[in-house]
Image (spheres, helix red, strand yellow):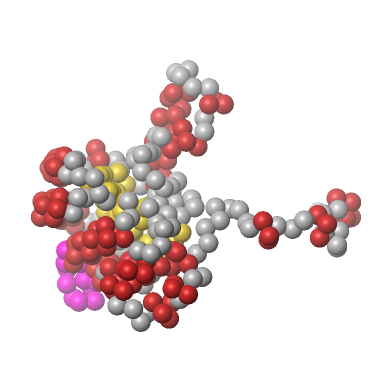
Amino acid sequence: MSADLDPSRLSRLSTAELLGTLQGYDNLPRHVAIIMDGNGRWAKRRFLPRVAGHRAGRHSVRRCVRACGELGVNVLTLYTFSQENFHRPEAEVKALWHFLQETLAAEAEDLRRQNVVLRASGALEKLPPQARDGLQKVIDGLADNTGLILNLALAYGGRQEILQAAVKLSRRLAAGELREEDVTEELFAAGLYSPDLPDPDLVIRTSGEGRLSNFLLWQSAYSEILITPVLWPDFCERDLYLAVADYLSRERRFGKIKPQDAERPSEDRAGLLDPARWKRMLKGRP
């Protein structure tokens, strides 16, 4: 780990100094994805309705968009509404869609000034028509921007995404457009909701829960995952910078090991690789 990323040192830096330290690295994550969790608990602790937590969380979205732009992150994906969220009380679901429309309308001009591109991933046909139309209007209004891609995961489910990609592929196979030997990971991934976006390098989950909750299951196969106890409405620029610093301190191996860590056959002094030895050990095993 670089001395610059020592946690004790980072804790003494101001937020601006922390940003400056991170900007000196050339291996920053290109794609950061966040599971925004804890709005309900944040509101409950303050004896407020759940929708108050969602409203407070809007400020965290604004902070993270700005922070990712300053860091030079290419894509920020926010888990905004899962397919499972449709099973929440009807009043809360309606309030969430209304809040989404309200937020997009309120933030559109600020996103334009920040050169942000807006995208959406998910089963968008399941959105209420008014919410879908409002979303598309903002997407179209920001289409000429060239900066950070803000990707909202809406009506999103990782298993459902993989299933629909498999169905697309099976139809092409059945139609004779493809042969079985033509199928590759890249071809399969082309059937996902946003195949042109890179896989997330860093997945952050707020509120301390240690699960992915059906989020980007295919894409996060090799992502670094960070769990923070901070509730989403309290998540700020500094929390994001510290998460990125933690990411930079890790060694991404993608299933591989360092050459110097690989065992060579000549080092097998105990005969652990001898097939005859394994046969003797397993003899008589049920």
179 to 268, vertically: above or below: above
Residue 227, percent from left and from top: 41, 67
x, y percent for residue 263:
74, 58
Residue 97 vertical placement versus 141 (above, below): below
Residue in the image at 35% along x and 82% along y: 12
Q: Which residue appears at 43% of the width and 81% of the height?
A: 8
How many numbered dots are placed on residues in this image? 0
* Residue 25 shown in magenta: no
Give percent across and percent down for residue 61.
Answer: 23, 60
Q: Residue at 35% of width from left, 47% of height from top?
A: 157
Q: Say left or right for 263 vs 143.
A: right
Observer-nearest of 5 and 138:
5
Q: Please state which of residues 260 and 153 is positioned toward the viewer in this rendering.
A: 260
The residue sitting at the top extreme is 176
Question: Residue 62 is drawn in which quadrant?
Answer: bottom left
Where residue 15 sits: x, y (%)? Answer: 29, 74
Q: Which residues are magenta?
A: 42-55
Measured along the vertical axis of the image, is residue 11 above or below residue 121?
A: below
Residue at (31% x, 60% y) in the render: 71
